[in-house]
Image (tube, rainbow, N blue to C red):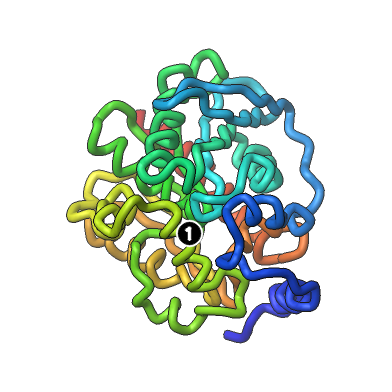
Amino acid sequence: MALDPQAKFILDQMEAMGGPLMHTLSPEEARLTTDFSALAGEPEAVAKVEDRKIPGPAGEIPVRIYTPEGEGPFPVLVYYHGGGWVIGNLETVDVPCRMLANQANCMVVSVDYRLAPEHKFPAAADDSYAAAKWVAENAASIQADPDRIAVGGDSAGGNLAAVVALMARDKGEISLAYQMLIYPVTNHSYATESYNENAEGYLLTKDSMIWFWNHYLRNEEDGKKPYASPLQASDLSGLAPALVLTGEFDPLRDEGEAYAEKLKEAGVPVEANRYDGMIHGFFWMPGVLEQGRKSIEQAAAALKQAFQGSVASK
C-alpha cells in the first residue's frame, strides 16, 4: 500500500517545521519539545475524570481514572502511554483514553509510570504491574469489577501491557481478562524487515528506537529478558487474550506481528490487524487521521466484547 494521504500530510508538515531529530536531544529536551496533542483532537467529555496517586514499589505512582456514564461496577482497562519509556505522560493519551472509556463503557486507569534514564529497566515494568495489582485489590473503592481487568498501551506502553500480562501469569496474583497491544515494542533487536524499510522518514526512526532502548536498559543483557523483550519469552501459554494492532510504515510492525503469531502458536486467542498506509503513533492522532479514529473504535469494540465474554464465563 501507499502511505496514507493524511499521514503523508502530517509528515510533510513536520518536515516543513524542521526541528532537531529525537536521537540528537537529551531526554529533558525531548520531553519539552515532543507534543502530539494537537493531532489528538478535542477531548471528549467523560462522566468523571480523577487524578490521584497510588502506592508503587518506589513511591507513589500518578494515575488518571476515567469513569463512563452509568452504574458500576465497571470493567476496567489499565492503560500505559507510549514514548519509548523516556517521554510521554498522562496528557499524551488523554484523548484516546476518554474515547475508550466512552466507547467500551469501561473505566480507564491511565498510569504515569517512572521514566528512563532516571529510572531504568525494570522500573517502568514494576510500576505498571503494581498499578494493575492495585486496581485488582482496590476495585470496589473505585467502582471497578475485579473480575474484568484488561491491560493496554501503545508502543512502549504496548510493551508494558504485554509484560504485565506475562508478570500476572507468572506471579499468579491477579487475573487479566484481556491485553490490548497497540504497535507494541516486543524485542530488543533492529533486525526486522520493517526496521529496514521504515528506518527513517515515518515519524518513529530506527535511530530514535536505539536512543530509547539505550536509555531504558541498564545493559545488553537486560534486552534479552522477557520483561523487556516479551518476544524472547520461552512460553507464552496461559496469557490473556490479545488484540495486536500494527502500522504498515512503522519500524515496530514486524515485531508486533511476530508477537501476535507467537501468542497464537501458544494457544492464546489473538485478533491481529495491520493498518495499511499508517505510520507509528496513529492511535494518538484521531483528530487528524481517520485510521487513528478507526483503530480506537476497533480497540474499544474488542475490549467491550472481551469484557462481555468475561461475564458470560463467570
**Residue 173 appears left or right of 145:** left
Q: Which residue is mark 1?
A: 212
In the picture shown, does residue 95 fall above or below 26?
Answer: above
Q: Residues within 10 Å of mark 1 (few under 14, many from 20)?
A: many
In the picture shown, does residue 170 fall above or below 294?
Answer: above
Q: Quadrant of the C terminus?
A: top left
Which residue is at the far left? 234
Which residue is at the far top? 141
**Mark 1 secondary-structure assignment:** helix
Q: Quadrant of the N terminus?
A: bottom right
Identified at 62% across, 43% down, the residue is: 89
In the picture shown, does residue 262 fall above or below 305?
Answer: below
**Residue 14 appears left or right of 85:** right
**Residue 286 appears left or right of 179:** right
Q: Nearer the viewer, residue 117 or 42?
A: 117
Amino acid identity at mark 1? Phe
Task: Please state the horizontal and vertical placement of residue 17, each as a whole percent of the image.
Answer: 80, 72
Task: Please state the horizontal and vertical placement of residue 79, each as a whole percent of the image.
Answer: 53, 41
Q: Nearer the viewer, residue 23 or 132?
A: 23
Task: State how many labels appear.
Answer: 1
**Residue 19, picture quadrant:** bottom right
Task: Please state the horizontal and vertical placement of residue 223, each as a whole percent of the image.
Answer: 30, 57
In the picture shown, does residue 75 fall above or below 181?
Answer: above
